[in-house]
């Protein structure tokens, strides 16, 4: 492909590349070593080994941080997201939030600071992370829960947030999580890291649940809940330029 890139016009090369990849790529194998592990084990290993703290991912790593949820919780896309959620809270009179994949609480903390009357439920599958968050950040209105979102019931609220979580999961796990967690929430906002349209090869390419995503210059995929094997309708509320010129961070409202 590198030879073709050097001799073909850019637009023609992209057409050839996409066609080749659609025919070739049925599944992303980068996380296959995690396929027999529970989500708790997978994401505990990610935090324990700092798998999101290397290379470009570490560009925003706070000094002395005990836990770090990766660059997506700190780069400029996070500020735009916090602004969107705050505007949404005020426009829809939201009083309670449940946040799946609360991670190191950098995003949730800022949402709570900007909306002091809000009650917040942070959900994650890493026991030590949830213990740390409860010890460090919990208050009368802020609580953290270690829950398996594939099978356990989560605290109900006016608004459900799932930000850059589904992209780490297999299609089967996404179906199980959404079926278990979506019912009962009047408002649901989903944020996903996706290729820009011109770089999208195919939606929802399968992968094992793990630290990596479907997004990449070679894989050119992402999670799209409005495409097979999923069945949801959604409306895009926000699209933010990513550090990678081929990708963007999109936030959708489930309809």
Image (spheres, rainbow, N blue to C red):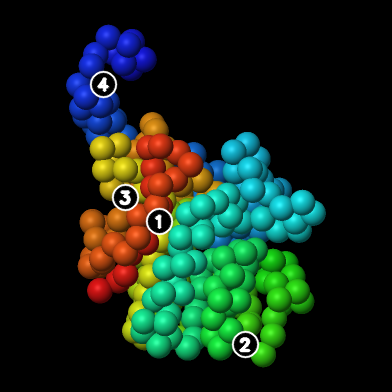
Viewport quadrant of the N terminus = top left
Q: Residues within 10 Å of mark 3 (few under 14, many from 20)?
A: many
Q: Secondary structure at mark 4?
A: helix
Res 10 label: 4
Q: Is residue 86 above or below residue 24?
A: below
Residue drawn at (34%, 38%) of the image:
220
Q: Which mark is residue 192?
A: 1
* First along the sequence among labels 2 and 1: 2
Q: Tell whether 237 sits left or right of 180.
A: left
Residue 124 seen in the current view: no
Describe the element under mark 2 as helix, strand or loop. Answer: loop
N-terminal-most mark, 3 or 4? 4
Q: Which residue is mark 2?
A: 141
Residue depth check, mark 2 versus mark 3: number of the one nearer the observer? 2
Name the quadrant of the C terminus: bottom left
90 lies left or right of 105:
left
Q: Is residue 19 visible?
A: yes
**Dot in front, 3 or 4:** 4
**Alpha-carbon distance for marks 2 and 1?**
27 Å
Q: Residues within 10 Å of mark 1 (few under 14, many from 20)?
A: many
Q: Residue at x 43, y 80 (%)?
A: 89
Q: Are marks 2 and 1 in contact (CB under 8 Å)?
A: no
Residue appearing at x 69%, y 66% in the figure: 129
Extreme residue in the right direction: 64
Q: Which residue is mark 3?
A: 204
Give residue 75's position: percent from left, percent from top.
55, 51
Q: Position of residue 19 (x, y in %)?
A: 21, 29
Cα distance in 3D space between marks 1 and 3 = 12 Å
Residue 63 at x, y = what percent? 77, 51
């Amino acid at each position: 492909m590198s030879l073709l890139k050097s001799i073909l016009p850019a637009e023609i090369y992209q057409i050839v590349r996409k066609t080749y990849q659609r025919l070739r790529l049925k599944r992303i194998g980068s996380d296959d070593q995690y396929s027999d592990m529970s989500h708790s084990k997978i994401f505990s290993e990610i935090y324990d080994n700092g798998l999101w703290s290397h290379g470009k991912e570490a560009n925003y790593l706070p000094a002395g941080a005990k836990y770090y949820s990766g660059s997506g919780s700190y780069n400029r896309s996070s500020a735009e997201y916090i602004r969107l959620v705050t505007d949404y809270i005020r426009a829809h009179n939201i009083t309670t939030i449940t946040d799946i994949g609360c991670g190191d609480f950098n995003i949730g903390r800022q949402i709570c600071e900007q909306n002091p009357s809000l009650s917040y439920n942070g959900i994650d599958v890493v026991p030590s992370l949830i213990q740390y968050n409860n010890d460090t950040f919990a208050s009368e209105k802020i609580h953290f829960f270690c829950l398996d979102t594939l099978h356990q019931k989560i605290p109900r609220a006016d608004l459900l947030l799932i930000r850059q979580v589904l992209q780490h999961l297999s299609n089967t796990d996404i179906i199980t999580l959404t079926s278990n967690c979506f019912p009962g929430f009047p408002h649901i906002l989903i944020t996903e890291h996706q290729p820009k349209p011109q770089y999208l090869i195919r939606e929802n390419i399968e992968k094992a649940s793990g630290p990596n995503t479907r997004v990449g210059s070679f894989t050119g995929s992402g999670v799209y809940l409005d495409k097979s094997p999923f069945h949801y309708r959604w409306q895009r509320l926000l699209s933010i330029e990513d550090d990678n010129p081929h990708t963007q961070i999109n936030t959708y409202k489930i309809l």
